[in-house]
C-alpha cells in the first residue's frame, strides 16, 4: 500500500504542502480552523510520519549551527523570597535543562509563579505571545502540591512526585531502586542491622518509594536483623531524645538517612560514636557538598536533560493536555562508597 504523504494531504485539503507540514508541527502561524481541518483529514487518510525521513531531518538539523527557534517555559512555584536555585538538585535540574534545550535550539524562560505581577491569565498570555507550548515544572516547595494553571494546549513535564495536580509526565530518580541499591551495597560490606531514618514529609514528596524498598528488605531479613525505621515528622529537624531512644532499642550497625547529614551525624557523635569505626552512615542522595559520605549520587544535570528530551517528544507528538495515564521516566543513581562506611 502506498504511504500517504504530506503532498497527498495537501492535494485533498486544497492547501500548499508547507501548510500541512506546519499543521502537523502545531505551528501557531496556522489558524486553529485550518489546523483542525488538516489534522482531521490526515487522520482519515491514515497518515503517519516516515521514521526514516524524520531521522534524516533530525540528522541534518544537528549538522547545522542551531539558533534559537523557540522557547520552553520553566515554572518556579517557590515563594519569591525563597531562592529555589540555592538547592543544589533543583539548580542542577535547571542547568541540565538549559544546556539540553540549547542543543535542540531552544532557550528556557523561567516564570516565578508567585511573583506579585504574575497571574495565571497573564502567564498564559505571555506564553501565547512567545509561542511557547512546552512547560517544565520545577519541584514544588515543601507543603505545596498544586500549580494553579490551566495546561490545556500545553505539553508539560515535572520533576519527581511533589506535584500532585495537574497530572503530567514525570522524570525522576528511581527512589525505590536506589534504596534497594544502598541496602545491597551495605550487605556486601557485611552490615547486617541497617537502620533507616526518614520523615513523613519527605516520604510524602517521594511517593513513599524509599520507605517501601526498606520495608520489602525488612521482611527478607532474619528476625534478628529487622529494625523498625525512625519516622520524623519534618524534613529539616529531628528530636534528639526520640533518636536516642530509637537507637538504643534498634541497635543499628549502619544508618541510612534521608534527613540531612548535619542533622544525624551530630546526634551520633553525642552518643559517643565514631563514623565509620563504631557505626556506618549512608546518605540517600549525595551532592558535591557530601563528597566524603557513602550513598547515592543523583545526577541532576542528566535528569534535567532527560526532562527536555521528553518534553520535546511530547511536543512532536502534539500531546497538548493533561493525560489520565501520564508516563514516568526513571533514572537510577550510582552508589558512591565514601569514608562513612567501613571497607572490607
Image (tube, rainbow, N blue to C red):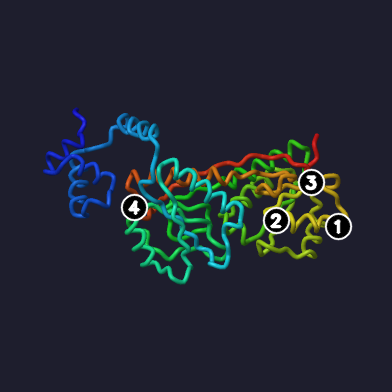
Structural distance between the alpha carbons of marks 3 and 4 = 48 Å
Structural distance between the alpha carbons of marks 2 and 4 = 38 Å
Per the image, the residue denoted by label 4 is 320
Q: Earlier in the sequence, mark 3 or mark 4?
A: 3
Q: Earlier in the sequence, mark 2 or mark 1?
A: 2
Per the image, the residue denoted by label 2 is 260
Quarter of the figure that contains the N terminus:
top left
Residue 224 seen: no
Q: How many marks?
A: 4
232 to the left or right of 3: right
Residue extending farthest to the right is 272
Q: Earlier in the sequence, mark 1 or mark 4?
A: 1
Per the image, the residue denoted by label 1 is 271
- Crowd band around label 3 with a 10 angstrom C-alpha radius: few (<14), some (14–19), many (20+): many
Q: Earlier in the sequence, mark 1 or mark 3?
A: 1
Instruction: Say which element carries label 4.
Output: loop
Quarter of the figure that contains the C terminus:
top right
Quarter of the image where one finds residue 294: top right
Quarter of the image where one finds residue 7: top left
- Crowd band around label 2 with a 10 angstrom C-alpha radius: few (<14), some (14–19), many (20+): some
Instruction: Say which element carries label 1.
Output: loop
Relative vertical location of residue 123 with respect to residue 187 in this rendering, above or below: below
Per the image, the residue denoted by label 3 is 280
Q: Nearer the viewer, residue 140 or 31?
A: 31
Q: Which mark is residue 74?
A: none
Pointers 1 and 4 in contact (CB under 8 A)?
no
- Crowd band around label 1 with a 10 angstrom C-alpha radius: few (<14), some (14–19), many (20+): few
Amino acid at each position: 500500500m502506498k504511504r500517504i504523504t504530506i503532498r497527498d494531504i495537501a492535494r485533498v485539503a486544497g492547501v500548499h504542502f508547507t501548510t500541512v507540514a506546519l499543521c502537523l508541527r502545531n505551528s501557531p502561524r496556522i489558524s486553529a480552523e485550518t489546523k483542525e481541518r488538516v489534522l482531521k483529514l490526515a487522520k482519515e487518510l491514515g497518515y503517519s510520519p516516515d521514521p526514516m525521513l524524520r531521522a534524516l531531518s533530525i540528522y541534518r538539523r544537528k549538522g547545522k549551527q542551531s539558533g534559537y527557534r523557540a522557547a520552553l517555559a520553566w515554572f518556579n512555584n517557590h515563594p519569591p523570597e525563597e531562592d529555589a536555585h540555592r538547592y543544589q538538585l533543583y539548580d542542577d535540574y535547571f542547568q541540565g535543562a538549559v544546556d539540553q534545550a540549547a542543543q535542540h535550539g531552544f532557550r528556557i524562560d523561567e516564570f516565578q509563579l508567585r511573583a506579585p505581577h504574575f497571574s495565571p491569565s497573564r502567564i498564559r498570555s505571555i506564553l501565547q505571545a512567545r509561542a511557547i507550548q512546552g512547560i517544565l515544572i520545577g519541584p514544588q516547595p515543601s507543603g505545596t502540591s498544586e500549580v494553579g494553571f490551566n495546561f490545556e494546549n500545553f505539553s508539560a513535564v515535572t520533576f519527581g512526585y511533589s506535584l500532585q495536580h495537574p497530572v503530567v509526565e514525570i522524570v525522576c530518580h528511581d527512589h525505590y531502586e536506589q534504596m534497594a541499591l544502598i541496602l545491597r551495597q551495605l550487605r556486601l560490606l557485611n552490615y547486617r542491622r541497617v537502620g533507616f531514618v526518614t520523615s513523613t514529609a519527605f516520604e510524602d514528596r517521594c511517593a513513599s518509594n524509599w520507605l517501601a524498598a526498606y520495608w520489602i528488605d525488612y521482611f527478607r531479613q532474619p528476625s534478628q536483623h529487622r529494625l523498625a525505621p525512625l519516622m520524623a515528622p519534618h524534613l529539616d529537624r529531628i528530636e534528639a531524645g526520640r533518636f536516642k531512644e530509637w537507637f538504643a532499642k534498634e541497635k543499628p550497625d549502619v544508618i541510612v538517612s534521608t534527613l540531612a547529614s548535619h542533622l544525624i551525624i551530630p546526634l551520633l557523635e553525642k552518643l559517643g560514636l565514631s563514623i565509620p569505626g563504631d557505626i556506618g552512615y549512608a546518605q540517600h542522595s549525595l551532592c558535591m557538598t557530601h563528597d566524603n559520605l557513602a550513598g547515592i549520587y543523583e545526577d541532576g544535570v542528566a535528569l534535567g536533560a532527560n526532562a527536555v528530551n521528553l518534553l520535546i517528544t511530547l511536543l512532536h507528538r502534539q500531546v497538548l493536555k493533561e493525560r489520565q495515564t501520564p508516563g514516568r521516566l526513571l533514572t537510577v543513581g550510582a552508589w558512591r562508597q565514601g569514608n562513612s562506611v567501613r571497607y572490607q
